[in-house]
Image (cartoon, rainbow, N blue to C red):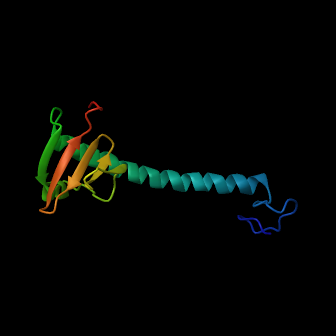
Amino acid sequence: MKCKICSTIIEGRSDKLFCSVKCKNYYHLNLRKATNIEVKFIDTILHRNRSILLEIMGKRKHQKKIHRIVLEKKKFNFKYHTHININSKGKTYFFVYDFAWMKFSNDEVLIIRNKNKSV
């Protein structure tokens, strides 16, 4: 078997992936770097989405229905959310941390603040 980094033939155990500690460390360091770059990119989008929802909701409101275009104009990214919840009626709620939104067929969006969280 060959090393994943330098393609040197590996001696020893049959399940070894790297020829040396140097190659192993190089591999894992670069894997962490790539992961951190992607995580930072996604986290930036999630934080921006939450900020947009907070701006629309204000500090006191717990629920508000708005037109989808309002979120689109503020560059809200509907593809990114922290989790999804489907209620007993089959309605899907998309969450960004402590806020949720639900899409309606008539281009309206219901925004809900999780009551257990504080701003």
Quarter of the picture containing the C terminus is top left
Could you tell me residue 33's position as x and y percent?
A: 55, 53
Residue at x 39% of width, y 48% of height: 43
Could you tell me residue 89's position as x and y percent?
A: 25, 53
- Residue in the foreground of this view, choosing between 93 and 57: 93
Residue at x 21% of width, y 43% of height: 112
Could you tell me residue 93's position as x and y percent?
A: 27, 51
Left or right relative to 8: residue 65:
left
Quarter of the picture containing the N terminus is bottom right
Left or right relative to 19: residue 50:
left
Q: Please, is residue 44 above or below residue 12 in the view? A: above
- Residue in the foreground of this view, choosing between 84 and 37: 84
Residue furthest to the right: 12
Residue at x 50% of width, y 50% of height: 36
Q: Quadrant of residue 113?
A: top left
Could you tell me residue 20's position as x and y percent?
A: 79, 56
Residue at x 28% of width, y 50% of height: 88
